[in-house]
Amino acid sequence: MCTLRICGDELDVEALLGHLTLEPAAVYRRGEALFKSTSRRRATSGVNIGVSDAGFANLDEQIADVCAFIEEHGSELAALRSLPGVEHIDFDFPVEEKDVTMPSYRFPAKLIELLASIGAELEVSLFPAAKDGSPTPQ
């Protein structure tokens, strides 16, 4: 479920798409409605690219998928950093919130080094664990 997000307040999405060989899962523009059912507007323009299909409860697999993705596409991703308007290149890891007093998540040095090599950021989005015993969303 890990998603690569490339965005910026003044990003020219069409120019970005012209430099991408990766297939975006979503393309959005500043000022568009955030959701169909709300009047809130997007503050940035950008693209989302799916990187891992591993579920919320499988952080280790998400990490392995992201490492392999950066190793394969690192040169392209690093080049995007120099495009006008690109403010953020981040990998958003959705994880299942642990039912403990102080949840923590560890990320290996290899991942941190790969992210740093392309000027990318790491984000963690916490999702509540299923309370009825049903599986966490995949």
Image: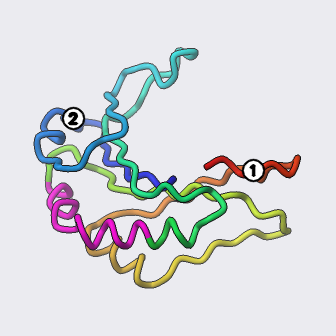
Of the numbered discs 2 and 1, the one sitting upstream in the chain is 2
**Magenta residues, start to end:** 65-82
The image shows residue 108 at horizontal and vertical percentages of 49, 82
The image shows residue 25 at horizontal and vertical percentages of 36, 39
Q: Which amino acid type is marked by label 2? A: Val
Residue at point 35%, 80% (across, down): 113
Q: Nearer the viewer, residue 46 or 70?
A: 70
Write down the residue under mark 1: 128
Q: In the drawing, what numbered circle is on residue 72?
A: none
Q: Quadrant of residue 13?
A: top left
Residue at point 61%, 49% (across, down): 138
Q: Is residue 76 magenta?
A: yes
Q: Nearer the viewer, residue 29 or 4?
A: 4
Residue 21 relative to residue 42: left or right: left
Distance in Å between CA atoms under marks 2 and 1: 33 Å
Residue 76 relative to residue 132: left or right: left
Q: Which amino acid type is marked by label 1? A: Pro
How crowded pointer 2 is (Cα within 10 Å; few <14, some 14-19, many 20+) is rated as: many
Q: Is residue 71 magenta?
A: yes
Q: In the drawing, what numbered circle is on residue 13?
A: 2
Above or below, 10 relative to 41 = below
| Secondary structure character of the magenta stretch overall | helix
Residue 122 relative to residue 21: left or right: right
Colour style of the rendered protein structure: rainbow
Q: Residue furthest right?
A: 132
Q: How many marks?
A: 2
Residue 22 relative to residue 52: left or right: left
